Image (tube, grey):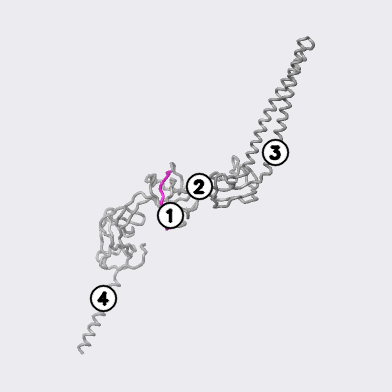
Amino acid sequence: MKKIAIFLFFVVTLGIWVGIKKSNSASALEVNAAVASVRNIESSILASGNVIYDREVNIRSEVTGRVSEVLVEEGQLVRKGDVLAKLDDTSFVARVEQMKSDINLLRIELSRAKEEHIRAQQQLKRIKLLLAQGLTSEDSVEELQTFANLARLQIERAKASLVGGEALLQESLQELAKTTFVAPMDGLVVSLSIKVGETVVAGTTNIIGSELMLVAAPSSMKINLRVDEADVANVKLGQLVNIYAAADQEKKILGTVSKIGVRAATANSTSNSGLVVMIKVDLDGNTQHLRSGMSCRAEIVNQQIGTAVVVPVSALNRQNDEDNYLWIVEEGKAKRLSVELGLATDTEQQILAGVSEGQQVITGPSRKTALLRDGIAVRVIETPNQGS
């Protein structure tokens, strides 16, 4: 009987203890938390931009014609001088042949004019001898002199016509050559805008010629960034840049600032948009997954700290401009700690003093952190969400 009484007392005591625990657990404030850690931290300027080729040639037609051959494909590597495409050159060849025929006629005309001039000079010489002997009149001499002068002028005219004809022939040959498009450099065919049978139009003063293709040097791939005018003063040549392409936002590509624009421009076409300065970034590393025109975001690093105690920005609280503090979890209770702040990024805050590595800091939600007091019971929930 005594043993039964002891057993019942033990059960009742255990039930009371469990009840108290459950009561305490139920009244504990549920919060999110993160662990203060030591790692590298960087302060950076955020920017966005696009992948570009710094050396590229947009091949356009300088003559009008129908495309007869396209000898490359988009993405193909080419060597300088390789034939890329051809236009139907039938009419151009015909014009060249016509010009050659015209030049032959002009040369014949020049030869005839020279012979006429020689004959006129000979006749003038003979008539002058007759005049000296009194066998002819002055009028006859003047008439032959006029004929000789006209023959000389005919030679000059034939020479001028021949020069003009040869110039037109050279122009025709150049236009014929322009029906064949060759690679201006070793590179990659980035885009191809023509097909066999299409008609391309020559460029004029007011009209841009038809775009055929774009050839670029793959080794010249860079990033063109738009940096807000308020931040550009903190950008320097050679500065480290972390780049994240839209194609793979988890993969960081390193780069360095190679050129800073000298003028600001509107960020877009809207009238109320801010001003930006264009920055070029040289890439260092594997860029095979990048394509020209891709969008990307970038972090231009302007300060680095090798090892620092870091907490999420969401853990930071501020009562006034000088009183910065965190809530930590210690033995299941909240504890307020004043801290000294260091470098900050968009997501992390360096703590110079007040919190040690490994301590659990409360990050939210804000509706719960507003209820925190020193010594209040808290329970860390497992959700990784640090938002409010």
**Looking at the picture, which amino acid does disc 2 mark?**
Ala
* Disc 2 from disc 4: Cα separation: 74 Å
Residue at mark 3: 97
Picture disc at residue 217: 2
**Looking at the picture, which amino acid does disc 4 mark?**
Ile
Occupied quadrant, residue 345: bottom left
> Where does the C terminus fall, quadrant-wise?
bottom left
Mark nearer the viewer, 4 or 3: 3
Q: Is the magenta stretch mostly helix, strand or loop?
A: strand
- Looking at the rendering, the stretch of residues picked out in magenta corresponds to 250-260
What residue appears at the point 74 percent right and 23 percent down from the top-left corner?
116
> Where does the N terminus fall, quadrant-wise?
bottom left
Mark nearer the viewer, 1 or 4: 1
CB contact under 8 Å: marks 1 and 4? no
Picture disc at residue 20: 4
Which is nearer the N-term, disc 4 or disc 3? 4
Magenta span includes 172: no
Is residue 272 among the parts visible in the rendering?
A: no
